Image: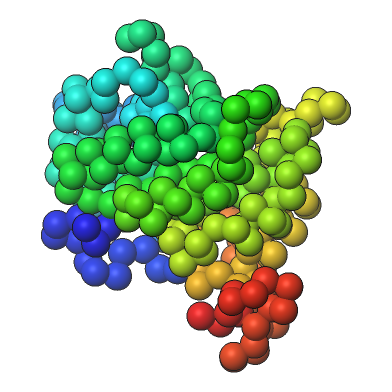
Amino acid sequence: MNGQLAGLPATGLSKNSVGLGLRSSHIDQILQQRPEVPWFEVLMENHTARGGLIADQLAAVREHYPISLHCLGMSIGGVDPLNMDYLATLKWMIKQYQPVQVSDHLCFTRYGKHQFNDLLPIPLTTESFQHIGSRIKQIQDYLGIRILIENVSSYLQFEASEMNEAEFLSELVSETGCGILLDINNAYVNEFNHGYSAKAFIDTLPIDSVGEVHLAGYEDKSDYLIDAHNNRVTDPVWALFEYYLQYAKGAPVLIEWDNDIPEFSVLLDEAEKAERIISRTSESRFPGSVRTDVPGKCATC
């Protein structure tokens, strides 16, 4: 499994290229103005129609831009049988739109045939690992690609958990060959909500397996943070992004904004800020240098 879809360029998305989430309110502007955006991420659930305006719009966007498909409904951590109708639709979309990458979350979204509109956390146990690893292998075998698994924000923790999320993801990469979608905002939200260091989270991941990075804004509820995707990226998340860049090879970066959608110019402004941070971090790195606080992490590899 090499993670490339049949017929796609071997290069895929350029490392550290900053893409935007495709939202319906911006599509007409994108098609008319053709902004210089390297790629767009598409929420699968919003574009499953096999005809009509939605399908035509996505086809038109895909004609001019690479896309990735971001899924909410694989329910990788669920105990119900895999939803093969859902996966069949995804497989059709892969063939139809040739996305560069496909991703979902380390969570469950379905139980007892009920679909939840949330990304629900799982206990991080050996039993869960064996169950989820098997499901990822089935999904990848069926789709014929490597998928990326995203770390999620959470608002509770399980006493039964035997490892932290970064350790769990690292083992999944080793066991299944999947990649990681590193959501830096989620890592910071979990640090605030649960006290687990977001830097330690990043340091624990097999960083070469990060195939995409998400940046987003949270909603501050004073006692806790909600991963609401309805604000600009905050200063602590930008700082954590810069920390990641100090030793990462680089991966495509997404500005993620799902609620209270602003003008398209606001998203472009956030992308430009990410590009400035990438450029500044790149200029500050020296060939062959190694961060001493993270053994084995090469600053230029």
Q: Residue furthest right?
A: 222
**Residue appearing at x 14%, y 60% in the figure:** 7
Q: Is residue 57 left or right of residue 143?
A: right
Q: Is residue 264 above or below residue 146?
A: above
- Nearest the eye: 205 or 29: 205
Horizontal and vertical percent for residue 238? Answer: 71, 56
Horizontal and vertical percent for residue 76? Answer: 37, 32
Can residue 94 be seen by looking at this rendering? no
Position of the N terminus, as image quadrant, is: bottom left
Q: Is residue 161 left or right of residue 77?
A: right
- Nearest the eye: 224 or 265: 224
Q: Is residue 147 above or below residue 200?
A: above
- Nearest the eye: 65 or 291: 291
Q: Residue furthest bottom?
A: 287
Can you tell which quarter of the image residue 191 is in? top right
Q: Is residue 157 left or right of residue 101?
A: right
Q: Is residue 223 left or right of residue 283?
A: right
Q: Is residue 111 above or below residue 14?
A: above
**Residue appearing at x 73%, y 73% in the figure:** 293
Can residue 157 be seen by looking at this rendering? yes
Horizontal and vertical percent for residue 267? Answer: 58, 47
Can you tell which quarter of the image residue 299 is in? bottom right
